[in-house]
Every structure is written in structure tokens, then in C-alpha cells.
Image (cartoon, rainbow, N blue to C red):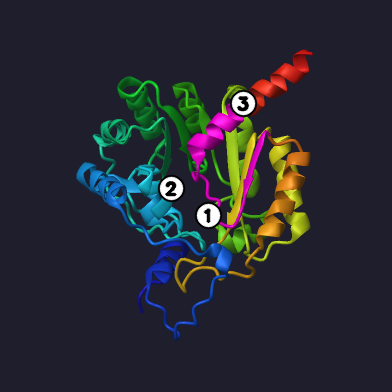
């Protein structure tokens, strides 16, 4: 009799295995979710540049619905540390498995991409790399340093994983490198973590963001949640309160969309009016900036939002000085 594989191995295998049951009928998306198919010369140029540099993007790997709009504007969110994640979150389309070795040329390639695209603001994210001693923090540092060296006028936004069991040192090193925005997504309400984000801990993610603000009060902090996963309205309000207690400046909220039949199902398509109501409540709770709509994603319109955050902070400081 063979030995059963360890639980994490069984979980990864289950996520990557073909569905054993008949595929359920595809949910019809409401009209407010529809987006145009990606076309155009700039879209092709952006895609080809990423291919030539061997860079992954969360736009493709996570099947972002806004890829057509963003890539047509030559905006792309680079995903460092490869295209394979060591976790298998129930909402995420990024493939899971054993990642390849870290590419030492990746930081320079990210800087080249930023220069070629003429980016005034870049968003850099990554897969989870629980296999690395520092969770991949040193690669974030090297990317920030390369960008500062090659494109000094480009503002830098990073969207990091939680660096499970090594977050304090990892976050300290990244903050010391000097990003302009530090983003880490809470993703959903704490009740749903065991099924939606089983490899992470809600309060550990909150503490990470709190640490960023404690280490560097001037760095903008940002976090996002998905709705439509079965959360209750008051649970979302509590997440907002938790974020404000951690000093988070910018809240993003968007509709969860099921990438494949193997992923968590959409429990509700939240209406644009409901998003507007969430946004009004979040602003009343004191966020510096709120972006909430069905198609809002962490890096959607990130450059424009960075300028809005700067303006909002300047206005806030001016009011305090009166």
C-alpha cells in the first residue's frame, strides 16, 4: 500500500487536476461586467515586449478583465519571481506548483520594460514563493533599485504577498528600498479565509500593512478586497474598519469573477449602485482614496490613482495646518 501524499501536495494536485464531474453551466455575466476584446497595435507591442524580456504579467496570468484597456495604453503590471505560485488560492487563476529558480536578470528586464513603455508609474507584484528563505523579498528590493537607477522619474507601486512566517524582516527590507506605494490585498472577509485564501491569515496581512506604515509613515499603503464570494455587507464594513485601524490609505474593491469551473463560484454579482454605497461608507471612514466598481482591480488606473492620493494627502495636510 502506498503512502498518501502530504496535505499540501494533495491540495495542489486537486487544484491542477481535470474536473472529475461534468462542467457546470457557465454563469452569465451582467451587462456591467462586459469588456471589449483586446485589440490594437499598442496591445500587441506591450505583449511582445513582455515576451521578449521573459516577463510574466498578472494581467495575463490572473486573466484580468481590463487587459485590453490597460495594454492598449501600454500599462502592464509585471509579476516577478516567475509565473508559478506555491499556493492554490480558490479565487486565483495563477498556476500553482514548484516554481523555477529566480531569474537574476529579472530586475533589469523590469526596468527595461518600464523605460520602453514610457511608464510614469509602474506596479510590480509577484507570486507567492514560500520555497524561498526570504519569500522573494530580496527580488523586490533589486527590482526597486533597478527602476530607481534606470527610470528615476517612474513612481513605484509594489503589491507583495504576505511573506508567511518571515514578514517582519521581508517587509523592513522592502520598505527600506523606498517604494512609493506598498499594496498588500486582504482579498476577502476573515470568515471566508479557510476556503478562499487557506494559505494566508487575515490578521497577519493586517499586521504587515500596519508595519509598513509604522516603518515609513509617508509611504502610501493600499489594500483590496473582492466581493461576490458570499460575504455579508457588515463583514465588509468591519474589514474597512480593520484597514483604517492599520492606517491603510487606499481601498480598492472589485467584483470577483470565477476564472475556471474549479475555482470558487460567484455567489453574487454586486451592482454598480451597491459598489457606490460601499465607496461612500469607506470615504466616511476616512480612507484617503477609494476605488470601488465591478471592474476595479488592484492596479487598474494605478498611475492616475497615485496622483489622486498625492493631491488628497496635500489637501489633508493643508487642512491640518489651518
**Gap in Å between the C-alphas at discs 1 and 2?**
10 Å
Side of 160 where 195 appears, left or right? right
Instruction: Relative to 15, say whether 207 is above or below.
Output: above
Q: Which residue is mark 2?
A: 128
Residue 167 visible in the picture: no
Q: Looking at the picture, how far across and down is residue 317, in whole percent?
A: 70, 19
The residue positioned 77% from the left and 18% from the top of the image is 320
Q: Give the residue drawn at x 59%, y 47%.
A: 224
The residue segment tinted magenta is 288-311
Q: Which residue is mark 1?
A: 199
Q: Position of residue 30 (x, y in %)?
A: 58, 70
Q: Quarter of the image for the C terminus: give it.
A: top right
x then y, percent, for residue 226: 60, 55
- The tag earlier along the polypeptide, 3 or 1, is 1
Q: Nearer the viewer, mark 3 or mark 1?
A: 3
Q: Are marks 1 and 2 in contact (CB under 8 Å)?
A: yes
Answer few, some or many: residues within 10 Å of disc 3's Cα (few below 14, many 20 plus, some between 14 and 19): few
Q: Any magenta on residue 195?
A: no
Mark 1 surroundings within 10 Å by alpha-carbon count, few (fewer than 14), some (14 through 19), many (20 or more): some
310 within the magenta span:
yes
Q: As displayed, is residue 243 above or below residue 23?
A: above
**Alpha carbon of mark 3 to alpha carbon of mark 1: how far?**
37 Å
Residue 89 in the image: above or below residue 266: above
Q: Which residue is mark 3?
A: 311
Q: Viewer-proximal residue, 255 or 101?
A: 255
Badge 3 or badge 2: first in the primary sequence:
2
Front in this rendered view, residue 192 or 283: 283
Amino acid at each position: 500500500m502506498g503512502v498518501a501524499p502530504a496535505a499540501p501536495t494533495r491540495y495542489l494536485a486537486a487544484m491542477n487536476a481535470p474536473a472529475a464531474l461534468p462542467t457546470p453551466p457557465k454563469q452569465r455575466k451582467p451587462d456591467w461586467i462586459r469588456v471589449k476584446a483586446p485589440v490594437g497595435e499598442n496591445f500587441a507591442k506591450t505583449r511582445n515586449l513582455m515576451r521578449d524580456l521573459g516577463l510574466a504579467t498578472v494581467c495575463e496570468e490572473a486573466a484580468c478583465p481590463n487587459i485590453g484597456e490597460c495594454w492598449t495604453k501600454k500599462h502592464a503590471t509585471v509579476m516577478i519571481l516567475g509565473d508559478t505560485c506555491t499556493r492554490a488560492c480558490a479565487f486565483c487563476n495563477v498556476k500553482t506548483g514548484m516554481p523555477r529558480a529566480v531569474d537574476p536578470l529579472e530586475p533589469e528586464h523590469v526596468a527595461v520594460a518600464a523605460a520602453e513603455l514610457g511608464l510614469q508609474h509602474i506596479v510590480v507584484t509577484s507570486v507567492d514563493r514560500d520555497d524561498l528563505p526570504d519569500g522573494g523579498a530580496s527580488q523586490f528590493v533589486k527590482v526597486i533599485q533597478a527602476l530607481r537607477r534606470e527610470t528615476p522619474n517612474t513612481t513605484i507601486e509594489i503589491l507583495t504577498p504576505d511573506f508567511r512566517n518571515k514578514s517582519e524582516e521581508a517587509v523592513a527590507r522592502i520598505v527600506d528600498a523606498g517604494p512609493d506605494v506598498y499594496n498588500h490585498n486582504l482579498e476577502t472577509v476573515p470568515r471566508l479565509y479557510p476556503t478562499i485564501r487557506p494559505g494566508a491569515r487575515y490578521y497577519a496581512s493586517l499586521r504587515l500593512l500596519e508595519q509598513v506604515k509604522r516603518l515609513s509613515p509617508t509611504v502610501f499603503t493600499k489594500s483590496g478586497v473582492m466581493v461576490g464570494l458570499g460575504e455579508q455587507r457588515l463583514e465588509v464594513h468591519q474589514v474597512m474598519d480593520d484597514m483604517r485601524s492599520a492606517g491603510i490609505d487606499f481601498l480598492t474593491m472589485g467584483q470577483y469573477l470565477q476564472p475556471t469551473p474549479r475555482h470558487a463560484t460567484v455567489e453574487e454579482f454586486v451592482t454598480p449602485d451597491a459598489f457606490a454605497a460601499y465607496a461612500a461608507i469607506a470615504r466616511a471612514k476616512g480612507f484617503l482614496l477609494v476605488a470601488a466598481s465591478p471592474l476595479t482591480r488592484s492596479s487598474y488606473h494605478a498611475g492616475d490613482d497615485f496622483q489622486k492620493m498625492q493631491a488628497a494627502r496635500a489637501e489633508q495636510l493643508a487642512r491640518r495646518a489651518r
